[in-house]
Amino acid sequence: MMKYKGYLGEVSYDANAKIFHGDVIGLKDVITFQGTTVKEIEQAFKDSINDYIAWCKKRGEKPEKTFSGNLRIRISPDLHAELSHLAVTQGLSLNSLIIDKLQKK
């Protein structure tokens, strides 16, 4: 996993073509990059992000961010009630309880 300016890139290697190929993940927009060495793929990743940001600026658009920090999930009403009750008994907000549980994996 690669990270630059808040964007995440995932890289794979094509042994037949002898090239690294990467994609920025978590966006609706498609951003790809490639290189034949680790140094090239790292630079191509940064260049692609910088080009994307410049392209958005030129168009007067706000660049999309990889992850907003908002996660919507659907759970059963019973589980929702159980988690809410647990949060109250621990003196936490439901959001804080869920973050704590997720961080513990």
Image (cartoon, rainbow, N blue to C red):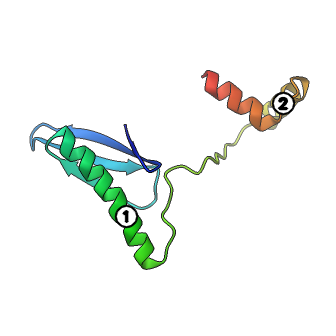
SS class, disc 1: helix
Which comes sooner in the sequence, label 1 or label 2? 1
Left or right relative to 101: residue 88: right
* Badge 1: residue crowd in 10 Å (few <14, some 14–19, many ≥20): some
Query: The N terminus appears in which quarter of the rendering?
Result: top left
Mark 2 nearby-residue class (10 Å; few <14, some 14–19, many ≥20): some
Quarter holding the C terminus? top right
Q: 66 above or below 90?
A: below
Judging depth in this view, the residue of 17 and 48 nearest the camera is 48
Amino acid at dot 1: Tyr
* Label disc, if present, on residue 99 of the rendered structure: none
Residue designated by label 1? 52
Q: Amino acid at mark 2?
A: Leu
Residue 21 visible in the shown view: no
Q: Would you say the residues marked 1 and 2 are in contact, meaning their CB atoms lie under 8 Å apart?
A: no
Q: How far across and how far down the image is residue 99, in percent?
A: 69, 32
Residue at point 36%, 57% (across, down): 49
Residue 1 visible in rendering: yes
Provide the secondary structure element on which disc 2 rests.
Answer: loop
Which residue matches tag 2?
A: 92
Cα gap from disc 1 to disc 2, whole angstroms: 40 Å
| Quadrant in the picture for residue 91 | top right
Front-lying residue, 94 or 8: 8
